[in-house]
Every structure is written in C-alpha cells, then in structure tokens.
Image: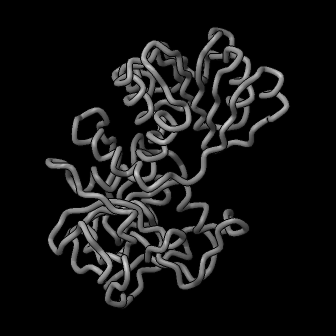
Amino acid sequence: MRALQITEYGDNSVLTIADVTLPHPTGSQVLVTVEAAALNPLDAALRSGYAQALMPLQFPATLGGDVAGVVAAVGPDVTGFSVGDRVYGNAYTLLGGSGAIAEQALVQARNLAAVPEGLSSVDAASMPVAGTTAVEAVDHNLHLQAGQKVYISGGSGAVGSAAIQVAKHLGAHVATTASGDGVDLVRGLGADEVFDHTTDDFSEHLREFDAVLDAVGGASLEKSYGILRRGGTLVTVIGELDQAAGEERGLTLVRQAAQSEEVLRELTGYLAAGVITPRVGATFPLEEAAAAFTALETRSVRGKVVISLLS
C-alpha cells in the first residue's frame, strides 16, 4: 500500500510516497482502509522537526492523525467495531497508530468512533483533532453554561469555529476574532460579538467575561487575562500561561494538551445532532500531498485541508 512518509526532518521536499506493508492488527488495534485524512498544524511541526524535542518520530514515519475510512480487520481484543464499519478518529503514531496519510492505517480502538450517519469521509476526517480539542475545552475545562460570556480567539479556525458552535448550543454569549471573509463566517456560526483583529482590539471592548478559550497564543493570549472577571477561567490550547497574572486576578488557568478518550464520542453526538458542522476548505489527492502541506502552512485555504485516498 502507499503511505506518505518522511525519513528525515525538513520542508516539503522530504515528503515521499512509499510502499509500506502493515502487520495484521493485534491487541486493541483496528486496521482501517483510509478514505480521507486531514492535516493539522501539528503535522507540519512534526515533518519539520520543530516538535521533535517533545514528540520525536521514528523513521521512516508515516504522517497524519485525522483519519476516516472503513474497518478492514480488528485485533483480538477489539469490541464494538466490526469489518465494514465506517469509522473516524486519530491515527497519530504518537498515540499508537501507524499514521493516517496512507491507504491503510492501524488505529487504537480507543481512538476511533463510528462516523455519524450522513457524514462523508472527507467531512469526518476533518473533525477528530480540532473537534475534540474544542469539546474538551468548552465542556470539560471551561464548564461553559447558558448565559455565561466566553471569548474565543481565532474564531474562523478549525478549533475556534467548532468551539463557537458548541458554546452557542449551550446558550453562551460568544465574542471572537477573525479577519477577511472569516468575519462573516463566524457571524454565520452565531458569534454575538466579532472583532476584525487586523483593525480592532478586542481587549478594548470586552470586560467581565466568564471564560476565555485561546487558540492563537501570543499577544492575544496576553490580553485575554484583562477581560476576565475575578474567578474566571482561561484555557489555552497553544500558548504559555502567565501564572502570576492568573493568581493576581484569581483566575483558573488550564494549558490543555491531550483529550480524554470519551470526548471523541461526545464530538460524534454533536456532529450527529448537527450542532457542529465540519468546514473543509480544500481536498487534495495523495499525489499532491506537498501542495496540501503548502496550503496548510501558508493558510491559503479557509477551512480544513484534507487528503483524499479515494481513487
């Protein structure tokens, strides 16, 4: 089978399509015939070596995490999945998978869920990492409730857009930032206050917010402390927290990393109910994987970048 691999860290020139043979699934592994795999910023960081200090790869390494496809075989310890089931989830090698961007992938059963009825493989593949990140933040770390006010940075991004939809479903008042056509996009998702970050500073307008979900980091995160009420909660999925600023304001600070296994099932419920609508910006065939990575890194596409393995 074909798989997108690297044998060294570098730019897109290190990407190769290799012929790979996967072993039969053992233990709690599931073998998935891949129909689509989506890219995340982590994929570029892994390929370039930027993340190697915390997440080193073993070469040759098959890239990709977000995956959707059909179960081809299951290990002896797997329950709940059968050959022919449509599934989606996380095939990152760092989580015990074999990598998503391949014609087949081994995935730990705990990192898979059934694709909601009516959802295409391309749409399903676009959701696992960004969707579970948003659900974990809104439901489990912010504990957002109806009537509360939440600021979500980078609202037109994959995490931000999913988080806005969940927050509005829960009855929260949502403020967010975007730019260009992203401004209309987040308004369409239901955001109550939208600031174009190229021309307006959200921190000059927002006060006494209950919660912040930071998906941008940098200056945006630094300004977020000042808009929270005393006792508010700030969750970041990308930045470094200022503990002193948090203590001064009596804030609960959370640096969110991995998601719990149950969150993928919660995401599936939100997708099935139409609470979250996937946003795919562009689809590339495996042969154009380098172009897909370029679209990801240059942010030339609004929405998720997906690699289709369907011929």
> x, y percentage for residue 228?
67, 18
> x, y percentage for residue 112?
34, 62
Q: Quadrant of residue 103?
A: bottom left
- Quadrant where the N terminus sits is bottom left
Number of numbered discs overlaid on the protein picture: 0
> x, y percentage for residue 215?
58, 38
Q: Residue at x 64, y 68 (%)?
A: 55
Q: Residue at x 46, y 53 (%)?
A: 295
Q: Quadrant of residue 142?
A: top right
Direction from residue 203 to residue 29 in the image, left or right: left
In the rendered view, would you say 62 is above or below 199?
below
In the rendered view, would you say 9 is above or below 116?
below
In the rendered view, would you say 172 is above or below 286?
above
Q: Residue at x 48, y 34 (%)?
A: 160
Direction from residue 288 to residue 60 in the image, left or right: right
Query: Which color scheme is applied?
Result: one colour
Q: Residue at x 62, y 15 (%)?
A: 200
> x, y percentage for residue 308?
29, 63
Along the line of sight, the residue nearer the viewer: 43 or 248? 248
- Quadrant where the C terminus sits is bottom left
Along the line of sight, the residue nearer the viewer: 68 or 137? 137
